[in-house]
């Protein structure tokens, strides 16, 4: 009998410290590239804490971990604010594991998960000036919807949707 190595597993509250570390490590380069600091953007994922993740779980957000080489290489979160809408949040792949398709697998996992919950649209928000990321999501089937300015953020936010 062949065993299947499941790479994407649901996370639990006990994983919050590990998840926060993955998110912080995965977003450091973005913080550096866009000059984000605790002062100008304290809620950026590069400053993620265990308490943030626990708060996400408390709100009903669900996390999934990607296992690679006996470690966790990445994670993603799913939130469903209403029956038709899902949010893909905190997509994170640790730098040593990038360019292996892990991010795309995590996104596809969320798409399948959202589909199983009869969600109609998956929404994401990204830094508007992050063209590489915008193109990456476009190649996965996301469509750019709108860009908004928020006074408390040092960048504009582009919202993208994936229609199921």
Image: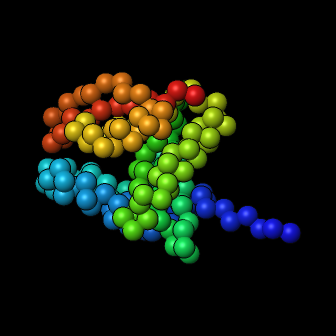
The answer to whether any part of residue 23 appears in the image is: yes
The image quarter containing residue 29 is bottom left
Instruction: Judge from the rendering whether residue 37 lies leftward or rightward of residue 43; answer left or right.
Output: left
From what the image shows, is residue 70 above or below residue 98? below
Q: Give the residue displayed 22% in from the left and 55% down from the top.
A: 31
Q: Can you give x and y, in whole percent of width and height, for residue 67 in the image?
A: 56, 66
Instruction: Judge from the rendering whether residue 6 lies leftward or rightward of residue 64; answer left or right.
Output: right
Number of numbered discs on residues: 0
Q: Give the residue displayed 62% in from the left and 42% down from the top.
A: 113
Instruction: Judge from the rendering whether residue 155 lies leftward or rightward of residue 116; answer left or right.
Output: left
The answer to whether any part of residue 60 appears in the image is: no
Q: Can you give x and y, in whole percent of width and height, for residue 149 in the image?
A: 20, 30
* Residue farthest toward the right in the current orientation of the protein: 1
Q: Give the residue displayed 39% in from the left and 64% down from the top.
A: 94
Residue 71 vs residue 149, the one in the foreground: 71
From what the image shows, is residue 37 above or below residue 138? below
Q: Can you give x and y, in whole percent of width and height, for residue 38 in the image?
A: 18, 57
The image quarter containing residue 125 is top left
| The N terminus: image quadrant | bottom right
Q: How is the image coloured?
A: rainbow
Q: Give the residue displayed 57% in from the left and 28% down from the top.
A: 164
Q: Can you give x and y, in whole percent of width and height, for residue 66 in the image?
A: 54, 61
Residue 79 vs residue 97, the one in the foreground: 97
């Amino acid at each position: 009998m062949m065993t299947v190595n499941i790479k994407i597993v649901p996370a639990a509250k006990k994983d919050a410290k590990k998840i926060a570390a993955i998110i912080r490590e995965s977003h450091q380069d973005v913080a550096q590239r866009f000059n984000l600091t605790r002062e100008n953007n304290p809620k950026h994922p590069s400053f993620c804490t265990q308490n943030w993740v626990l708060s996400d779980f408390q709100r009903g957000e669900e996390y999934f971990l990607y296992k690679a080489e006996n470690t966790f290489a990445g994670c993603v979160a799913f939130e469903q604010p209403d029956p038709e809408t899902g949010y893909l949040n905190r997509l994170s792949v640790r730098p040593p594991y990038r360019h292996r398709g892990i991010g795309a697998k995590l996104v596809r996992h969320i798409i399948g998960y959202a589909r199983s919950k009869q969600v109609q649209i998956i929404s994401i928000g990204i830094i508007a000036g992050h063209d590489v990321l915008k193109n990456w999501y476009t190649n996965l089937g996301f469509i750019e919807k709108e860009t908004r300015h928020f006074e408390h953020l040092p960048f504009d936010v582009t919202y993208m949707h994936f229609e199921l």
